[in-house]
Image (tube, rainbow, N blue to C red):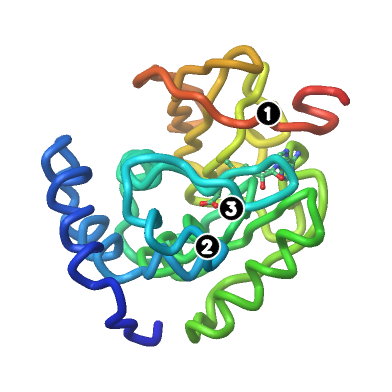
Amino acid sequence: MIEVKEWIFERERMVKEQIIARGIKDNRVIEAMKKVPRHLFVDKTYYHQAYNDYPLPIGHDQTISQPYMVAAMTEILELKGNEKVLEIGTGSGYQTAILALLCSKVYSIDRISELTRKARLKVDNLGFKNINLIVGDGSLGWPDYAPYTGILVTAGAPEIPNTLIEQLDENGRLVIPVGNEFSQILNLVKKHKGRIYRKEFFGCTFVPLIGKSGWHK
Ligand code: SAM
C-alpha cells in the first residue's frame, strides 16, 4: 500500500485513544489501523471527522463502520498473513483495505454497485494488488474461491447463513453480527475437525444484511 502522510497525527491519536485504550492487542491490527488513511474512504466533506469514534455515512443509506468495530472484528479473525478472506459488505472499502494488509488475498462483495465502483477506485489508487471486488448477494458467499480461512460480515444478519459456514475452511473463522434489524451480537463461528463452534462477543449495531440468506426486502 502507498504510504499516506496526511492526517497521520489524527490517525495515531485514533489508534491510541479508541483502539489500544479499548483493549485491542494484536500488533498487526494496530499497525494496519495506523497505516490505512480512513479519510480517503469518506466524502471530502467528512475528512475532518474521519478519525472520530463513530460510523459515517457513505451514501445509499450505508455507513463506514466505527474504527474500533473494524479493529475488533479484524482481531477476532486472528489473521497471521497467509489467509484467504471473504468480506461481505465492502461498503467504503476501508475494512477491505485493513484486511488486505493482514492476509494474502481478500474477496469482497457488496450488493450496491456504486459503492463497489468507488471502493475499487480507492483501493486501486492506494496500490492494493490483493483485493478482488464484486457486486452481488454476499449472503450466499462467493463459492468460486471457497473455502476461506476467514469470513467477515459487516452487515447484521437474522441468523448465521449456512452457505457461509459451508464456505469456511477447516480451522476457519467466521465473524458476523446476528440479531434483529436494530441491534445484534457479534458472533464467531469456528470450524474444527468438521464441527462447528459458536461464541458470542459484544452487542453492536449494523445496517441489515439484505439478501436470500439475510433480510428479505
Ligand atoms: N465494512 C464497510 C466499511 O468499512 O466501509 C462497512 C460496510 S456497511 C456497514 C454494510 C455494507 O453491507 C453496505 O455497503 C451494504 O450495501 C452491504 N450489504 C448489505 N447486504 C448485503 C449483501 N447481501 N451482500 C453484499 N453486501 C451487502
User: Relative to 97, is 31 on the left or the right?
Assistant: left
- The residue positioned 41% from the left and 42% from the top of the image is 66
- The answer to whether the residue bearing label 3 lies less than 8 angstroms from the nearest atom of ligand 1 is no
Query: Which residue lies under the disc numbered 3?
Result: 86
Quarter of the image that includes the C terminus = top right
Badge 3 amino acid: Leu
Could you say which quadrant of the image residue 178 lies in?
top right
- Looking at the picture, how far across and down is residue 95, in whole percent? 47, 55
Query: Which residue lies under the disc numbered 1?
Result: 208
- The answer to whether the residue bearing label 1 lies less than 8 angstroms from the nearest atom of ligand 1 is yes
Badge 2 amino acid: Thr
Up/down of 174 relative to 103, above or below: above
Up/down of 80 relative to 56, above or below: below
Q: Is residue 172 visible?
A: no
- The residue positioned 18% from the left and 68% from the top of the image is 9
Up/down of 104 relative to 138, above or below: below
Query: Residue 14, labelled with which disc?
Result: none
- The front one of 203 and 107 is 203
Q: CA distance from mark 3 to mark 2?
A: 30 Å
Badge 1 amino acid: Pro
Give the mark, 3 or 1, whose residue is nearer the N terminus.
3
2 or 1: mark nearer the eye: 2
Element at label 3: strand
Q: Quadrant of ligand 1?
A: top right
- Looking at the picture, how far across and down is residue 133, in whole percent? 69, 66
- The front one of 115 and 42 is 42
Element at label 1: loop
Query: Residue 45, labelled with which disc?
Result: 2
How many numbered marks, from 0 up? Answer: 3
- The residue positioned 58% from the left and 53% from the top of the image is 86
Up/down of 23 relative to 37, above or below: above
Give the mark, 2 or 1, whose residue is nearer the N terminus.
2
